[in-house]
């Protein structure tokens, strides 16, 4: 079946909206967790991507990347800016479904085997140690840092670990493109692009205090901690302007 046909088949059972050409699932965190739980009992491979304004803007500029995102089985609104944009186009998402929080829920509530791929030397291994200490149901069956010359050389190693879930933290575009390209060669059932989550799991990077998260100001906390991020933060107003223009067209 052609890729377009596969995409239409997937979307029949999904409630989605489209923002700047990227399809996003209309769901709550509870619904996302329940869906992944059901997928773990099935043999079909599934891709999960989480998007924020920066990633959507990347896809707007790169149609091939947009196609990769839209080939996923679930795309969640990772950034509050995406939720705001959904309201601006009159199709409000019920809540933000942050990838980091989704992963923690899965660690806590599913008895699954995970492979961690990404981050600097030693970070994924430390993240694995801390996750398994905190979440007894989660079993990290293998890990590898994000530095390798050929991913093909890692496929046999990953498959030997036989994970249920492969978490890939290589940064936007690279991680999603790798998952889409190689999923058929890997034994895992669920593939999730996790960005910099291993840094958070390991304790290398501290997450924002709860008050910032509840007020949807996690982005502001990161900016305070890393002022060099200001150029990346400019993507948000540009994103909202692009959304407003798309609504008028």
Image (cartoon, grey):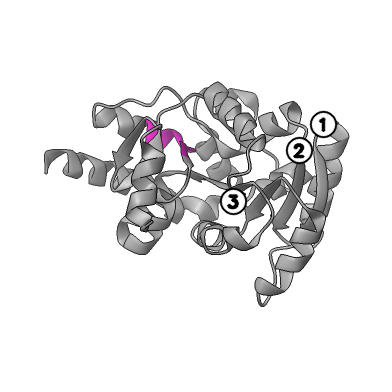
* Front in this rendered view, residue 80 or 43: 43
Work out whether mark 2 precedes mark 3 in sequence or the reverse, and give the earlier one: 2
Q: Which residue is mark 3?
A: 195
Q: Secondary structure at mark 3?
A: loop
In the foreground, 230 or 32: 32
Q: Residue at x 84, y 32 (%)?
A: 134
- Residue highlighted by disc 2: 112
N-term mark: 1 or 2: 2
Q: Is residue 92 left or right of residue 89?
A: right
Residue lying at 40% horizontally and 45% vertically, measured from the top left: 53
Residue 235 seen anywhere in this rendered image of the structure? no
Quarter location, residue 246 = top left
Q: Report the residue marked by disc 1.
A: 137
Quarter of the picture holding the C terminus: top left
> Please, what secondary structure does the residue beneath circle 1 have?
loop
Residue at x 40% of width, y 29% of height:
26
Measured in 3D between alpha carbons, the distance from the residue under mark 1 to the one under mark 3, in whole angstroms, is 23 Å
* Residue 106 pos. (x, y %): 68, 32
* Circle number at residue 180: none
The magenta region covers 75-83
- The residues tagged by marks 1 and 2 sit, at their Cα atoms, a distance apart of 7 Å
The N terminus lies in which quarter of the figure? Answer: bottom left
Q: Are marks 1 and 2 in contact (CB under 8 Å)?
A: yes
Percent across and percent down for residue 5 are 34, 51
Please identify the quarter of the rendering in which residue 168 is found: bottom right
Q: Residues within 10 Å of mark 2 (few under 14, many from 20)?
A: some
Residue 10 lies left or right of residue 46; in this view the side is left
Residues 153 and 234: in front is: 153
Distance of label 2 from label 3 (alpha carbons): 20 Å
Q: Magenta span has 82?
A: yes
Specify the farthest residue to the bottom. Answer: 149
Q: Secondary structure beneath disc 2? A: loop
């Amino acid at each position: 079946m052609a890729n377009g046909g596969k995409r239409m088949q997937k979307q029949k059972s999904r409630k989605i909206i489209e923002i700047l050409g990227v399809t996003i699932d209309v769901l709550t965190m509870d619904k996302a967790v329940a869906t992944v739980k059901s997928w773990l009992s099935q043999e079909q491979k599934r891709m999960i991507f989480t998007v924020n304004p920066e990633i959507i803007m990347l896809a707007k500029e790169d149609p091939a990347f947009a196609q990769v995102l839209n080939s996923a089985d679930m795309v969640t609104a990772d950034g509050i800016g995406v939720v705001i944009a959904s309201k601006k186009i009159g199709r409000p998402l019920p809540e933000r479904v942050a990838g980091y929080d989704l992963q923690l829920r899965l660690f806590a509530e599913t008895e699954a085997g995970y492979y961690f791929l990404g981050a600097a030397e030693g970070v994924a291994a430390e993240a694995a140690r801390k996750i398994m200490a905190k979440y007894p149901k989660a079993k990290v069956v293998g890990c590898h840092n994000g530095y390798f010359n050929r991913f093909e050389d890692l496929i046999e190693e990953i498959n030997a670990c036989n994970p249920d879930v492969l978490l890939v933290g290589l940064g936007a575009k690279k991680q999603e493109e790798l998952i889409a390209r190689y999923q058929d060669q890997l034994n895992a059932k669920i593939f999730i692009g996790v960005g910099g989550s291993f840094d958070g799991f390991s304790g290398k990077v501290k997450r924002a205090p709860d008050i910032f998260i509840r007020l949807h100001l996690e982005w502001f906390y990161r900016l305070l901690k890393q002022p060099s991020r200001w150029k990346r933060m400019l993507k948000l107003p540009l994103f909202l302007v692009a959304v407003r223009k798309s609504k008028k067209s």
